[in-house]
Every structure is written in C-alpha cells, then in structure tokens.
Image: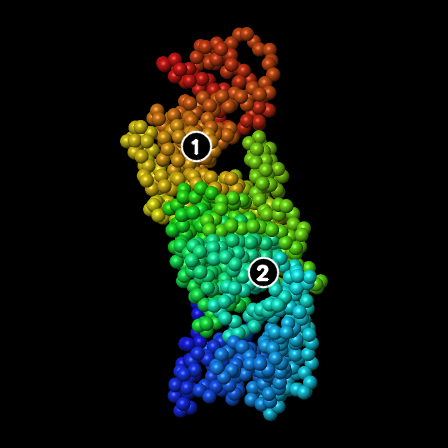
Amino acid sequence: MALRLAADFDLRKDVLPGLRAAAGARGGGAGILENNYESLRVLNVERNGNIIYTYKDDKGNVFFGLFDCHTRQNEHLYTFEKDLQVVSCSVNRERTLLAASLVQSTKEGRRNELQPGSKCLTLLVEIHPVNNVKVLKAVDSYIWVQFLHPHVESNPLPENHLLLISEEKYIEQFHIQVIQEDGNGVVIKNSGHLPRERVAEDFVWAQWDMSEQRLYYVELKKSRSILKCIQFYADENFNLMFEAPLDIALSDSGFNLVNFGCTDLQDQEKLSEHPTLCVFTNHTGSLCVCYSPKLDSWEQITYSVFYFHKGHSKTFTAALGSADSRVTKGITFLNLDYFVAVYLPGHFFHLLNIQHPDLVCHSLFLTGNNEVVDMLPHGPLQSLSGSLVLDWCSGRLYRADLNRSYLLEFLWDARLDWEKMAVLHCVLSCRQDTRFLEAKIIQWISENISACHSFDLIQEFIIASSYWSIYPETGNMDKLLPYSSVLTWNTEIPGITLVTEEIALPLMRVHSFKGYWEKLHSNLEYVKYSEPHSHYSNSVVRREWHSLISEEKTGKRRSMAYVRNILDNAIKVISKLEARRLEPRLTPLFQEEDNHQRLLVGLMVSELKDHLLRHLPGIEKKRIEQMVLDYISKQLDLICQILEASWRRHNLHPWIFHLVWALGWRSPSYLGGFCNRRASAAEFAVFHIMTRILEATHSLFLPLPPGFHTLHTVLGVRCLPLHNLLHYIDNGVLLLTETAVTRLMKDLDNTEKSEKLKFSIIVRLPPLIGQKICRLWDHPMSSNIISRNHVKRLLQDYKKQPRSSVIDKSSYSVEFLPLNYFTGILTDIESSSQALNAFEGHDNVDAKFVEEAALKHTTVLLGL
C-alpha cells in the first residue's frame, strides 16, 4: 500500500500481557481481565508520546494506566473504586497529577448517554503519592481535560496548567501550583482556590495539537465560520495567533472535538453522517484545513482543502461508483508532513501534495480499482502530530510514512502520465537512502524513456530530485527553485474533479513571530506580495553564456578577472561533484577542460547565488553559496548517474572511448563502407540515452558534465551513417568539440571515405578551432585550407604598391607567371616586420608553403 503504518504501540501486545501477569500475581488469575477485555481502551496520547489507557475489573472498578513510549514499560496511575464511565483523562508531565472526567454508568450498561440528572465529575488527583482528590467540576454536561506539556528544561515545573473543555461550548484554563512534601511527594498548593480563566467560548468545533500545544477552534459569527488559533507557552501566557474565515457549513447546534482523547460518545458507524474538519501544519509553515461535509449522495463525495499558506482552496468531488456501494465509514484525513492523505475505505485514497498543490498531477489519486484502498485499517483513524495515526478501535498507534517499496513498484506498473508524475514526486520526497531511490528511478527511466507524452522523464527527474536535495535547508525553496518541469496540466484525472478558488488569508493577531509562526507569516506575506516570476530560471544565464561564446568567436573577451571568477565557480562545483563519487567512474567524462560547459556551470552558480541572496536576506552568504554548489553539483551528478547506469547496464567500458578510433576506424573491414561493421546494440542504446539527456537539458539550459559532448560525438560517429551524422551536427544535436575532432584527425587514415568525413567535419568547425585541426591532418586538402586562411590574413590590410614588371624567374620553382607574381606579393608582405609580428607562430606557413599547396591542388584538379 502507498502508506506504511509501523505500529509504535499495540494495546493487546504492549499492555494486555502485563495486566494478565499482574492479575495472576495478585491471585486473581487472568479471568478478571478476560471478562472485561472490552473495557480496555486508549484514552489519550500526551505530547511526550506516553499513552494513557483504562480498563475495569469484575467489580467495575476503573483503572488508569500509562505506557511509557521510551522505556516500553507500563505504570499504574490510579484506581477509582466505583463503576464509572471515563470521558477523558490527562496526566501532567511529571506524572504527579491526574485529571479525569467521569460519568455514572447506566444499569443497562450502555455507555453513550447519561441518566437524567446524572453528574459529570471532573476530578484532579494527586498520584505521587496517591493522596487528595479535588472536584473541579460537577455539571450535567460532558467535560474533557488536557494538561499542557510545555517544552522547557526545568524539572519539575512549579506550576501546571490544565484545560477544561465543556460541552457547553467554553474552554477554561486552570493554574495549579504544586509543592513537594515528604521528600518526593507532590501536593497541590491552595487546592481550595485554583486560579482559572476563560480561554474560548461559543465555539462549535475544536482541535488540540499536542505536539505544538495549540488550540484551534471555530466560532460562528452571523452564520459564518471563523477559525481561530491559540498558542500556549511554557509560562501561563497564551496568545490568539490568527483568525481566518472558512467557507464551510457548520451547525450552531453541533459540537465536535478532535484530538482530545477518545470516548465512546459517538457512534462510529454514523460518522459519515457528520461533517469532518481538521487542521494540519508542518515545519515549513504550511497551514491546511481539511473539510468534508456530511454525505448526501451515495454516488459521489466532496471534500475541500484550504491551503492558507498558498492563498487558495481546492474542492474535490470523487465518484463512489454504483449507488449500491453504500458508505458506512467516515472520510479520514491524515497528516504526512509534505502530504495530506484523504482516505475513504473501499473507495479511494488521495495523496495531496500540500507544498505544491497547484497542479493536480503532483498528487496521487487511487480508486477502488487499486488494492491500496482496502489495505489500510477500516476503523476510524485519528491523525495526531508528527505523522502519528491512532486507530481507536484496535488500540494501535502507528507512525505513518510513504511506502517506498510500494511506490517504486507502482511506478513500474503505472500506465498514465499523471500517475507517473505523481508517484515520481512521492518517491523523491522520501529522503532516506536517496542514492538507492535515485538508482531505482534511473533504471525505470532507462527502460521507459519514450513512455511519457505529457512531460520529459529526464527533465522532471533532474528538476525534482535537485529540488528535494536542498529543500530541507530552508522552507522557502518552494518559492525560489523550480519543483517541476511542467508548468501547466490540463488533462483530467479519471474519477475526480476539482474546483480551485482564492481564499481570504488569515489575519495575524500578533506582531512578533518565532519558529513556525515566522514561517507561516513569511508564506502569507509571499502570497500577498509575491513577484510574478520568483522561481529561478536560466534565462539570464542563457543570454550571458551566448554573449561570452560570441565574444570568444570574434576574438573579444571580457576582463580576465570576470572570466576567471566564473571558471573558479565551475571548479568548486566539479570538486563538490567529485566528492560525491563513491566508486570509480565508468564513463570517460571530466577528461578535458570543455571551457564552454565550465562557463555555463560558473555562470549558473553566479546567477543562482544572486537570486537566493535577493530573496533570502536572513541567511548568511556562505550558507547560500554552499546551497548553490550543492544544487548545481546535484544536477550534474544526476546526469552522470544516468550515464553510469546506462554504461553499466550495457556493459560498456571506459576504454571504448579509445578503441572507437584505434580499432574501429582503422579496421579496413569497417572503413570499407563507412559502416560495414555496425555499432553494437549497446552503443546504440547509450547514444540514444545521451541524445535524450541532451534534449532534456537543452530546453532547460542546464549544464552538462565536461566531456559529455565529446563522448556523444564519438558514439555518434560509431552509430550513424555519414548523412545522418552530418544532419545531427548541422542541427546542433552533436557538438564538435576540439577533443573529439583532434582524435578523429589523428586516428583515421586517408582513405576516400575517411577523407570525406574529415573534410565534412573541418568545414563545419569554427575558424579558430578549424585552423588548429587542419595542422593535425597531413593532407593536400588540409594544406589548401591552411594556405587560404594564411592568404586571407595577409591580404586583409594589403595596399597595392608599384612593382617592377620584370620577374626574376630564377627564384621560382615553376615557370607560371600568375602564381609567381602572386607569390612575390606575399613574400613582400611577409618581409615587413609588422607582418612578421602579427603572424608569428603559424607553424612556418609562408609564401613558399602557399605556392606548394597551390600547385598540389591544381595538379589534383587537372588529374595529373
């Protein structure tokens, strides 16, 4: 299944055996508990993870116990020697005080209603040691209790704070001072008068966040739902943090509590008849409100998610199939950090991406056709803080996270593009053992390279994986770096429709923010004042890189300090990349300078660093530079991983880079028809994957590892017929690097077909590189090109001077007047010191060389 539920606690396994053993030791035997097993249930989960449970003996006495999640031990807290029904229970951090709310059991044994006139007692008990019992409330309505568990270093706390939540729609906070007596004994100070204050009133819904010590509640004002949040602190202070309007329908007569423990007061079979509402946050400053109205149709169900940190909501309508597929369970929302799971047993499972909710393809929707919708527990699940999930019925506490194995398997089986996209992002969000996950995804991409039509697999993998590699560094990365290569998605998802609406942002009621609140405030400010294009793109890098390359071709250059700084950036990235490498590299990359790619890498470092410094003023420059180096080196590393995987899969070796020329082209059987010995299937496969990498990086203007173009060209010469090869070169698919062409000129012989290839390549080279390459080819054609370039240089600034009409024939080897006259002009120009200085160092190319080249060329043309 897409979710993995790892049991942190199981009432039957972690509590029941100990209770049986204790009962046996007391001489009562196991039967005391066996006869009342159904009374054993979980009451509450405190902030520290400790679990409070209760059970009854044969006499109806109520026992309270605590399971310590750290020591895995059970502790008896207190016993009420009366047959009472427990509504709620909580224990303070030091386990010295217990608060409990109890009602009288009916004679018929039913637990879901009070007898007329019966009282709900809210008691505060000293349990270290067992001592006084104080009645806090004795009313005709239900009361729920919850101790605050502040995160402070001092131990023990001199004062405890207890929340009382009344069915009469108010919440009070009691301040309880304690003192130590008789050593470690703790008693309540001034128990006759405990200070208290009203925290909230006139609410119809409330939720407790045990981890962050926050209270969310909804008030109705003029039939409009207003969500409010109170933050409790280590001292007795608390603040109203925000108010936010909610476009949902809640009844003024209704009353619902979330995460205030478990009671038997609600009939779980009727949950589908009531609206579901819950609030989820995470460490990035997200604020999601999930809502599902009561079910009014057996054919479809509607639920909404308010993404306050993004400024919009999405309302989903999911088809339920046939009308006879009756829904007997309520919809369940689960908080999974970067995702929210929406689960309706037997019908669908929707994994919503809350960091990037804009495109529906980034969320995974599974229907009843998938086995996953029946593999999760069918009982009511309650989502607690920290991805904890409590199954009240079974008494199990789970830690939920995405199931990597299932998602990877699903990735291989997915047929629709939106499924592939959604699962790919789900897998990449699992940051444990990323090298393993990336290797599995690369294997999948290699075998399904052409299987996607809506997006480019390689592009999406590089962008998404690079994003997740540094996302934990700061929560603002979702606004500054691209998350996906896909900007729009218009394809409908079968079985679900959605409507997106803008929503009013929460009104913050405080002006000083720390921790989560600082991040939420930053998110809200971004929604208000965001720039239209704050995500980084390589458009500026593209312009600057083309400008530098153009200047290089024309012989112009920026200041050496500017270029040196860019190349130094590239060196840092490549050093970082090499540090990632855990084993020797198979592919022959990084074996040449490749200044063009190094310029691109360096420019990207410079531009991305400026971009992050602009938008992250609170982060020091050195940390941002490190993040930039990590991000760009990660992109290069992913490309290297794809190549390495392909190289390994097809059993190629680094020395093929040399044998391509040394054995392949020099073999007469191979040269006989330019491609009589076809390249192997393995070489074709690697060439194809390299071409797809080039296509993916070209449109995004991403850098490639130095040596990539050389290796790509080498394989292109191996795999393509001449006309295809030249077509690839002319269209920019194959880039003629100096290293690749140098190897070609040195290793190929001068047969007719080799000459044709060499000449076709030389004429396509930039002039500066072409001049260098011609000197490596000892051939009349090369001499002719060198001579033409030499003459062109000499005559560029030539001014005709009067010359003698008498030519000294003795100084020329051939009696051919036009050639002799022209050679004389060249000799005169070369004899000037200015010309010698200007053309110094050209391998002794002079008028004599030009004369010989001209004669050879003429001889060839005349067939002599």
- Judging depth in this view, the residue of 804 and 655 nearest the camera is 655
> Please, is residue 790 above or below residue 864 in the view?
below
Q: Tell me the residue at 40%/56% (across/down).
A: 370
Residues packed near mark 2 inside 10 Å, few (<14), some (14 to 19) or many (20 plus): some
Q: Amino acid at mark 1?
A: Tyr
**Which residue appears farthest toward the right when viewing the image?**
511
Residue 804 placement: quadrant? top right
> Please, is residue 22 above or below residue 830 in the view?
below
Q: Residue 394, position in %: x, y? A: 44, 72
Residues packed near mark 1 inside 10 Å, few (<14), some (14 to 19) or many (20 plus): some
> Please, is residue 413 above or below residue 665 in the view?
below
Q: Which residue is mark 2?
A: 289
Q: Residue 700, labelled with which disc?
A: none
Q: Secondary structure at mark 1?
A: helix
**Which residue appears farthest toward the left when viewing the image?**
669
> Please, is residue 224 above or below residue 608 in the view?
below
Residue 293 placement: quadrant? bottom right
Quadrant of the image containing the C terminus: top left
Q: Nearer the viewer, mark 2 or mark 1?
A: 2
Q: Residue 623, position in %: x, y? A: 59, 56
Q: Residue 346, position in %: x, y? A: 42, 60
Q: Tell me the residue at 58%/59% (across/down).
A: 288
Give the spatial CA distance, label 2 vs label 1: 53 Å
Residue 87 relative to residue 764: left or right = right
- Judging depth in this view, the residue of 815 and 444 nearest the camera is 444
Q: Tell me the residue at 44%/20% (across/down).
A: 853
Q: Residue 728, labelled with which disc?
A: 1
Q: Amino acid at mark 2?
A: Val
- Judging depth in this view, the residue of 191 and 798 nearest the camera is 191
Q: Tell me the residue at 48%/26% (across/down).
A: 844
Quadrant of the image containing the N terminus: bottom left
